[in-house]
Image: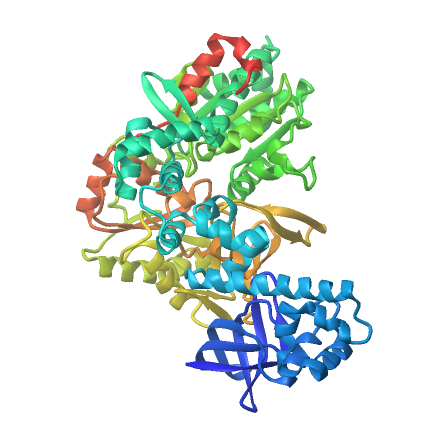
């Protein structure tokens, strides 16, 4: 339905995303219209497309899906438009004088014949030109936004583009829409490519080939690679663009010359990096070797201190644990790795005790808020996320380039398998000479979601001392979780025959049966059995799509666990007060407030942070979330895509977290996804209960499938290179 009328009143306006509540005069009848409006003012004419809806609180409204400004055509509309203050130099009184003099031709005079404005008392030649310029500026903005909307760009994004490019908007988009990918958050290659096609830009345009190359490198980074072999990059880009390889290959050299890409020979492979990824991986490698080489080796006998620790804490450390403690205390960088129940936490406690006796202060860190909270609870010491630790001493500045050393002598990082090259590089840049870095994790878990193969490469380099904990402590007659996790890791079937333990396998054949069982288990049976709220449990899915994927399971679980309440809907996703949600990207600018145990403000919400929706604003689209660590965050409408339902999450997203209970579907699917270490990672997330739902045949297939996707990474080579020639450490990285 299309309506045209003038804006009588603007009741609400969010200038960030354009969300507006306006009263329109439609042929004398008032109509409340809501939606995303371009910059508008009272008195303007607009054309709106949409439908009438009945809001439960505010009644009948016109929900606009498309809004276009139309210059006012009546004298009254022109007076209100000019008198609104939108045009600098014109107020209500001047607007009346202008329309009294020029009538319906007023806007035409301002735009094309500004010298005629001087007939009005009080308007000099200079003021007439100023009014003319202000009017043109406003009109250019309107034209640019309308032009962008004609390219099928949503209004909110169009406003963002105009705020960035200003008067150059149309020329930039017409000449090279691929520039939007670099400059405008939320615009990717496919969107830019669609705009380019409408502009008639040829498929073999250098702009398009360069954008395609950068897109493929970014996409492979999301798969964990830090680079691609040149031939593979060319082939993937040619397939994406449907272009000849020769031209694409030539554009790689142009991008290298421009400094956007970096070419490196790695073990006979011509590796092509995005420059930022190259700097992060090489910088992280250099930082580690500097810590190795510059640390003052402590020839300190830890034996008596370990005995004292054992006496005080009434524990007996295994020889591997003692070796891990000695190695951490005596070396600049060390790695401690082991599966569940092998005593990693006990080792961390002992290391802290001994380093403090030596006058070495320590900091405990983890990649995610949940992992940091768990580390704090298990050690009884303060622990923080790596991101927050890096921001602590540098305030609101960009900590990614900050070099102020952290005030500590030892840093212990737990769940290091989750750390990517960017995060490791940021950390090592902040560690002073002599600082000990102890990396703790499970080498058999899934690698980081981000780019790099940090833990595996560090271990494989053979340069940094590694201690592997293999003796299982956390295994009792009451629990099967640890022993079954180790069985899976060794390629053996877990014990699924005990019906009165904490590890269950429930048979279900079809996808629908599996999904039905999961909903019942997660919402009713397990919460009742464990006497916990459903939100304390976590459904972990191998994939996002399908009947048993996270998207479908989140919808079903929401319907049962949190079926009603105040809500807003964006696309296919409903955000409802009380919903369990997860932040799915790093946002360094998103503000938060903590009220307890003390008042604190800050910026930065990061991938994997979880919480509960505390409120939603139907009018503005804002979502209020209370994160699990006590921080309150308000999500504006333009960043709500960073927040997703979390009743069910992928196994990858669960890394670093620990849940009271874990429920996982066991189904058929791609052998590249349904692997042994994915199952192992899921099981090791559980504290008190594991329920696997599905077909035993597919369970065995997962355990037998030891496929580990190859990641292209250069850290192992860089570590070896830097260690072999220390002079490189002080050169360009």
Q: Quadrant of the N terminus?
A: bottom left
Residue pictured at 32% horizontal, 27% vertical: 230
- Residue 442 shows up from this direction: no
Report the coloring of the rendering.
rainbow
Q: Is 644 rendered above or below residue 202?
A: below
- Residue 415 shows up from this direction: yes
Quarter of the image for residue 675 reads: top left
Is 58 left or right of 648, judged from the image as shown? Answer: right
Quarter of the image for residue 112 reads: bottom right
Is 197 left or right of 73, judged from the image as shown? Answer: left
Work out whether residue 123 or residue 366 is closer to the camera in this orientation and state it. 123
Is 715 left or right of 21, judged from the image as shown? Answer: left
Residue situated furthest bottom in the rendering: 28
Number of marks in the rendered image = 0
Work out whether residue 240 or residue 679 is closer to the camera in this orientation and state it. 240
Is 576 left or right of 386, judged from the image as shown? Answer: left
Residue 214, image x and y in percent? 40, 38
Residue pictured at 46% horizontal, 63% vertical: 149
Residue 321, image x and y in percent? 47, 21
Residue 560, image x and y in percent? 39, 67
Q: Is 76 rendered above or below residue 128?
A: below
Q: Is 653 rendered above or below residue 334?
A: below
Residue 115, image x and y in percent? 71, 68
């Amino acid at each position: 339905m299309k309506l045209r009328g003038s804006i009588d009143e603007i009741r609400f306006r969010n200038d960030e995303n354009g969300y507006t509540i306006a009263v329109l005069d439609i042929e004398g009848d008032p109509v409340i219209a809501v939606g995303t409006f371009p910059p508008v003012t009272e008195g303007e004419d607009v054309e709106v497309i949409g439908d009438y809806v009945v809001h439960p609180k505010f009644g009948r409204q016109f929900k606009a899906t498309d809004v276009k400004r139309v210059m006012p055509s009546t004298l009254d509309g022109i007076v209100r438009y000019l008198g609104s203050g939108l045009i600098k130099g014109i107020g209500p009184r001047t607007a009346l004088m202008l329309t009294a003099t020029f009538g319906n031709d007023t806007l035409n005079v301002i735009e094309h014949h500004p010298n005629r404005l001087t007939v009005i008392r009080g308007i000099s030649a200079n003021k007439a030109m100023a009014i003319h310029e202000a009017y043109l500026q406003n009109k250019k903005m309107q034209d640019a936004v309308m032009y962008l909307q004609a390219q099928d760009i949503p209004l909110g994004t169009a406003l963002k583009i105009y705020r960035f490019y200003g008067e150059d908007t149309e020329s930039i988009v017409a000449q090279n829409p691929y520039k939007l990918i670099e400059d405008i958050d939320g615009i990717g290659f496919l969107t830019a490519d669609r705009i380019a096609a409408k502009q008639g830009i040829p498929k073999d345009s250098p702009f398009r080939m360069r954008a395609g190359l950068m897109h493929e490198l970014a996409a492979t980074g999301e798969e964990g690679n830090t680079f691609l072999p040149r031939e593979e990059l060319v082939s993937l880009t040619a397939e994406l663009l449907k272009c000849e390889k020769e031209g694409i290959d030539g554009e790689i050299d142009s991008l290298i010359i421009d400094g956007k890409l970096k070419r490196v020979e790695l073990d006979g492979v011509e590796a092509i990096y995005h420059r930022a990824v190259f700097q992060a991986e090489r910088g992280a490698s250099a930082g580690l070797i500097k810590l190795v080489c510059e640390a003052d080796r402590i020839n300190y006998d830890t034996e008596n201190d370990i005995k004292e620790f054992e006496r005080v804490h009434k524990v007996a450390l295994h020889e591997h644990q003692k070796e891990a403690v000695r190695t951490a205390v005596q070396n600049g960088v060390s790695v401690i790795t082991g599966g569940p129940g092998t005593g990693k936490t006990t080792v961390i406690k002992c290391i802290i005790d001994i380093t403090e006796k030596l006058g070495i202060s320590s900091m405990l860190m983890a990649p995610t808020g949940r992992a940091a909270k768990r580390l704090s609870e298990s050690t009884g010491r303060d622990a923080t996320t790596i991101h927050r630790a890096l921001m602590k001493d540098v305030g609101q500045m960009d900590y990614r380039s900050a070099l102020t050393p952290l005030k500590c002598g030892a840093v212990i990082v737990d769940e290091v398998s989750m750390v990517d090259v960017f995060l490791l590089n940021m950390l090592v840049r902040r560690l002073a000479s002599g600082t000990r870095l102890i990396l703790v994790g499970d080498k058999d878990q899934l690698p980081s979601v981000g780019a790099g193969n940090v833990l595996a490469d560090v271990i494989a380099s053979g340069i940094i001392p590694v201690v592997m904990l293999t003796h299982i402590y956390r295994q009792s007659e009451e629990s099967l979780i640890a022993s079954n996790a180790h069985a899976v890791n060794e390629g053996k079937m877990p014990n699924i025959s005990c019906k009165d333990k904490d590890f269950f396998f429930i048979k279900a054949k079809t996808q629908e049966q599996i999904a039905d069982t999961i909903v019942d288990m997660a919402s009713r049976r397990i919460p009742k059995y464990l006497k916990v709220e459903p939100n304390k449990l976590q459904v972990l899915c191998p994939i996002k799509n399908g009947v048993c994927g996270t998207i479908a399971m989140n919808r079903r679980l929401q319907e049962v666990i949190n079926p009603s309440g105040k809500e807003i809907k964006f696309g296919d996703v409903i955000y409802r007060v009380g919903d369990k949600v997860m932040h799915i990207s790093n946002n360094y600018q998103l503000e938060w407030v903590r009220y307890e145990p003390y008042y604190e403000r800050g910026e930065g919400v990061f991938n994997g942070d979880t919480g509960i929706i505390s409120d939603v604003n139907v009018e503005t689209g804002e979502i209020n979330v209370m994160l699990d660590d006590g921080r309150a965050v308000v999500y504006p409408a333009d960043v709500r895509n960073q927040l997703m339902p979390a009743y069910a999450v992928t196994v990858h997203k669960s890394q670093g977290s620990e849940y009271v209970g874990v429920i996982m579907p066991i189904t058929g699917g791609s052998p590249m996804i349904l692997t042994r270490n994915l199952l192992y990672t899921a099981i090791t997330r559980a504290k008190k209960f594991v329920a696997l739902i599905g077909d035993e045949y597919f369970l065995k297939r997962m355990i037998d499938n030891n496929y580990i996707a190859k990641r292209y990474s250069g850290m192992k080579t860089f570590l070896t290179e830097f260690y072999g020639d220390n002079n490189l450490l002080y050169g360009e990285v």
